[in-house]
Amino acid sequence: MAFKVVVPQMGESVLEGTIVEWKVAEGDRVKVNQPLVEIMTDKVNVEIPSEIEGVVEKIHAQPGEVVPVGRLLCTILAAGESPSAVPEKVAPRPAAGPASSPAAAVSAPAPETGGRERMTPAVRKLAREFGLDPGTIIGTGPDGRITKEDVQKAASARSPVASMATAAAASKPAAAGPALPKHVPSTLSTAGDKVEERIPLAGARKLIAEHMVKSRQTSVHVTTFEDCDFTPLVEFRERIKEQFLASYGVKLTYMPFITKAAVECLKEFPAVNASLTDTEIILKKYYNIGFAVARDSGLIVPVLHAADKKTIVELALAMDDLGQRARTDQLKLNEVQGGTFTLTNAGMFGASASTPIINQPQVAILGIHKIAERPVVRNGQIVIRHMSTFGMSFDHRLIDGHTAVQFLHRLIEYLQYPALFLLGQP
């Protein structure tokens, strides 16, 4: 009986994903742990491996299709099954000729069927994004294979507007500001002197959009703001940052200190480290801190597991590692799962205040903003201090206003008097 490969559970808040690319085709022989298909969620791209050795019998979902958890992806005939068990429509791999080497036989292209097999998966994906039928594209590559340039040429030929879009994309230099998601084609439309660029809402951006809408529809969002005097930490960091870089090879930021303080506060206010269902309040007795990382394809939130068991140094090293791998799409699935509380630092981009959206199924998120010199009153005198504003959004279904304010006050107390936790346990 054929083995069924289904969409696995990819996190407690991930209910579906989008198929990016199949790594195999019907009729391919696969080994245990060989990647079968790549699926994109709003958190991370995941490769689904084969659990058995055998032959891919049938693929049941195509690239670009949104597939929910549990959906059948493909079936695999176990090793040892009779070749006749493979469906007749699956074309066998062409046999190598007398002069062919074994390597050449493995890499020989599949027979052409309507243009689909005459292009690489990347080129096929590009054609799909432009809405082109591969069978209508003239290939100029070796043996008539369709290249990326062939797809772009076919897209440009559809209309003068599409041609303008392709020419503009090829000629204009990289613009300042946020980059568009990769592999998302756009078109220009003109009406008189008005020019509009239309970009498909797809991929990671579409999934993030859906996740944000779900959070707003689920949680009763309220945001409370408080100012924090970072002067003691600024002075402490200035004294040790060069030595820290020389010793550990990473720059010391304020995020490890904020993370450490947040963990201590979560222990004191357990309702903030929780989730909520229709019938239960789930208080988490572990402390997994997510922190938002900006990247071209969209925001992602890697998770520091067991953050309460880490020192400031360990937090700094772990955040640097996760942040670098997040920006290069190298995170593993478990590294974006299981968060209990999230930090998002808009201050690194110059924001002085914001109202962040809760990362489901959590019940609170802390917005961190730029640290800047401001005039403040201390002991009846106007002095210059390094100040920042925190904005914590919380789910009012579970967290009352006084609890959120007390949590934020306690967090600021730790940061304004860092010895309270710097001298404590990890």
Image: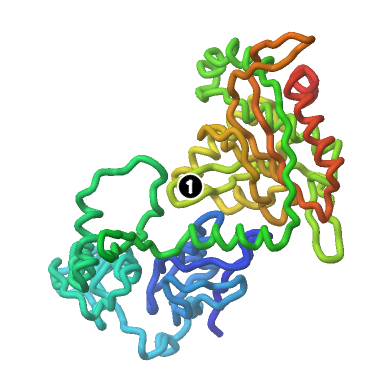
Left or right placement of residue 20 versus residue 390 in this view: left
- 82 or 60, which lies in front? 60
Q: Secondary structure at mark 1?
A: loop
Q: Quadrant of the C terminus?
A: top right
Q: Amino acid at mark 1?
A: Gln
Spot occupied by residue 254 in the image (x, y as percentages of width and height): 62, 26
Residue 36 seen anywhere in this rendered image of the structure? no
Total marks shown come to 1
Spot occupied by residue 207 in the image (x, y as percentages of width and height): 53, 61
Spot occupied by residue 17 in the image (x, y as percentages of width and height): 54, 66
The residue identified by callout 1 is 330
Residue at 24% over, 80% down: 135
User: How many residues crowd around disc 1 within 10 Å: few (fewer than 14), some, or many (20 or more)?
Assistant: few
- Residue 4 occupies quadrant: bottom right
Q: Quadrant of the N terminus?
A: bottom right
Residue 59 seen anywhere in this rendered image of the structure? yes
Residue at 32% over, 73% down: 131
How did the renderer colour the structure?
rainbow
Left or right placement of residue 227 versus residue 104 in this view: right
Left or right placement of residue 390 versus residue 423 in this view: left
Q: Is residue 290 above or below residue 64?
A: above
Residue at 59% over, 45% down: 302
Q: Is residue 247 above or below residue 300?
A: above
Q: Is residue 268 above or below residue 47?
A: above
Left or right placement of residue 2 versus residue 185 in this view: right
Spot occupied by residue 86 in the image (x, y as percentages of width and height): 42, 86
Q: Is residue 405 above or below residue 172?
A: above
